[in-house]
Amino acid sequence: MARFNLGHTLLLENDLERGLPLLEARREVFRTGADLAGEAWRGEARPGDTLLVLAEQGLGDHLLMSRFFPRLFDSFARVVVQTPPPLERLMSRFDPRLELVTSPEGARFDAWAPIMSLPLLLGVRGVLDLPNEPWLSVTAPERPTGRPRVGLNWAGNPSYAYDAVRSTSLETFAPLLAIGDVEWVSLHRGVREHEAEAFGLEQPLREAKDFLDTAEVIAGLDLVISTETAIPNLSAAMGVPTCVLTTMDVDWRWAAWYSGVTVCAQQTPGNWFGSIAEAAETIRTLLASRASDQAA
C-alpha cells in the first residue's frame, strides 16, 4: 500500500517514470487478475496473440485509459476489452477493431493486462509520451448559433466512498447560474436530478440510456463544468472545453493527461467558493469571445 500511495504522489508531480511502476502495487493490494488463467502481459510484441484488457476502478478511469486502445494493435492481432455496460455502446463506436465484453468469463485470450497498466506497458515514461489529442467523438447535434450552451454536473454516484468530498448541491453553483446570456444544461443523472428541475435547467439526459447518449449531448456544448466524476473525463476525451471542480488535493489525472481542461481547485477544504469563482471567469471569457466573434 505504501508503494501504491507513493506512486500516486509521484504522478501528482508528473513524474510518470517513477510513478507508473509504483502504481503497479495495486495489483497486490486489490489482487487484480488473480483469478484469471493465462499470463500477464509484460509489454512485449505478440503479433499472433489476443490481449484481454481488464476493467478497473471507475468509469472515468476507463475513459482516461481508452486513449491507448489503438496502440495495442501494434503488439496484438486481437484486442478484447472488458467494458462496463454504461460505456459499451460508446466504446463500440471508438474503434471497430476492438472486441468488447462486459465480463472476462468465457473470453478467449492469450495474455491479459489491467487497463490502468496500459501506459506503463506501452512505454510511457513522461507526460510528452501521452497521446493528448481528443480521441472520442460523436456527431454533434445541429443547433442555431446563439448563446453558449454550458453543461453542469455537480454530483456523482453517492455509493462512491469519497462522494461526500467530491460532490455538492446545485445550490453551490448559484453564482454561475446568475450569469446571463448562457443556456444552462444539466448533465447530472441520479439522486439530485430534482435540483435541476428546481433551477429550471434543461435536462436532455433524462431519457439517456448510457454514455453514448451523454456524449451526443456533450458534443453540442461549448463548455462543461463538473465536479470529479466520469463527466469531465468524457468531455475532455472528446475535446470539449472543460472546467473540473476539485478538492484542494488535485488528482493527478487532471495534471497533464487531458488538454483543454481548466482545474478549479478548492482553496480551503470543503469550500467551493474559489472553484466556482474560477469557473465563472471561464464563462465570462467564453462570453467575451463569443461577443467578439459576432461583432466581427
Image (cartoon, rainbow, N blue to C red):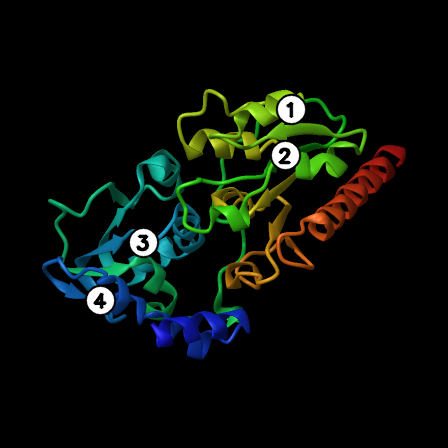
Disc 3 to disc 1, how far (Cα)? 33 Å
Who's the residue at 45% across and 53% down the image? Answer: 64
Label 4 Cα crowd, 10 Å radius (few <14 / some 14-19 / many 20+): some
Establish if 155 lies above or below 208. below
- List x then y, in percent, for residue 191: 48, 30
* Disc 2 crowd, CA 10 A, few/some/many (<14, 14-19, 20+): many
In this figure, which residue is indicated by the disc labeled 2? 170
Residue nearer the viewer, 268 or 93: 268
Q: Which residue is mark 4?
A: 41
**Going from the N terminus, do you reach mark 3 or mark 4 first?**
4
The kind of residue tagged 4 is: Trp
Look at the numbered discs 1 and 2 and tell me whether their residues touch, using CB distance below 8 Å: yes
The residue wearing badge 3 is 56
Q: How much space separates mark 3 and mark 2, taking CA atoms?
A: 30 Å
Task: Measure how far apart labels 4 and 2 are at the Cα level.
Answer: 44 Å
Which sits earlier in the primary sequence, circle 1 or circle 4? 4
Q: Give the labeled residue for mark 1.
A: 201
- Label 3 sits on what residue type? Glu
Position of residue 116 measured from the top left corner of the image (x, y, whole percent): 35, 60
Q: Position of residue 234 (x, y in %)?
A: 50, 44
Between the C-alphas of marks 3 and 4, the distance is: 16 Å
Q: Is residue 31 above or below residue 264?
A: below
Label 1 is placed on what type of residue?
A: Leu
